[in-house]
Image: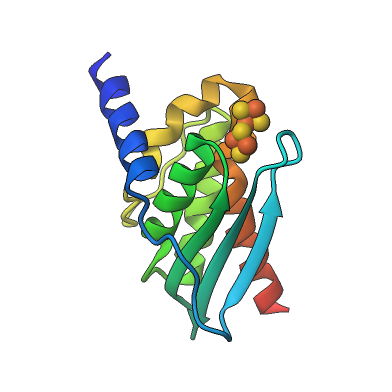
Amino acid sequence: NNLDTLYRQVIMDHYKNPRNRGSLDEGSLTIDMNNPTCGDRIQIHLQVEDGKVEDAKFEGEGCSISLSSASMMTQAIKGQSVENALKMSKYFSEMMMGEESELEDIDLGDIEALQGVAKFPARIKCATLAWKAMEKGIDEQEK
Ligand code: FES
Ligand code: FES
């Protein structure tokens, strides 16, 4: 249907014109994570200050789903509180389980464009890779 077509266009746009591709200065967090099912690997870079995600970037190689997801994820969490970034991550993983959850008052950016991936279990790891890396980085920083 039309929504699927629109979502597919959004995914391809992030894949072809990735937002926030690159690295950050020293002193930022870098999380390297691979998808064991295919061996693809991405790095997420985060600059977190005073409970806020000041900047987020990504590098690495992967399929269109993993890279577009990393692009959408960095765009969505940039400028958000750490708390909101984690809420978005929870929302995203629930979306991948096909659950409809609610998240009010947070701008989700384009992340909902990937909801169709829930229908393809083999691709879910591709879509959640960047989010898992982001969560790991925040977790490590808080220790
Ligand atoms: Fe098979 Fe990503 S692991 S498509
Ligand atoms: Fe490797 Fe999607 S096939 S991350």
Residue 51 seen from this side: no
Quadrant for ligand 1?
top right
Residue 64 image position (x, y, % from top left): 48, 36
The N terminus appears in which quarter of the rendering? top left
Reply above or below: 9 against 31: above
Q: Indicate left or right for 131 with 111 as reference.
A: right
Q: Nearer the viewer, residue 42 or 93?
A: 42
Front-most of 43 and 95? 43
Residue drawn 35% across the image and 42% down it: 16
Which residue is drawn at the image coordinates 37% and 51% (left, top)?
18
Task: Name the outermost residue toward the top.
Answer: 1
What residue is rendered at 65% in x and 25% in y? 122
Its colouring scheme is: rainbow
Image quarter where the C terminus lies is bottom right
Q: Is residue 46 above or below residue 17?
A: below
- Where residue 140 appears, as percent x and y from the top left, is 70, 72
Residue 32 percent coordinates (x, y)? 67, 61
Determine which quarter of the picture holds residue 75: bottom left
Residue 29, image x and y in percent?
A: 60, 75
Q: Residue at x 57, y 21 (%)?
A: 120
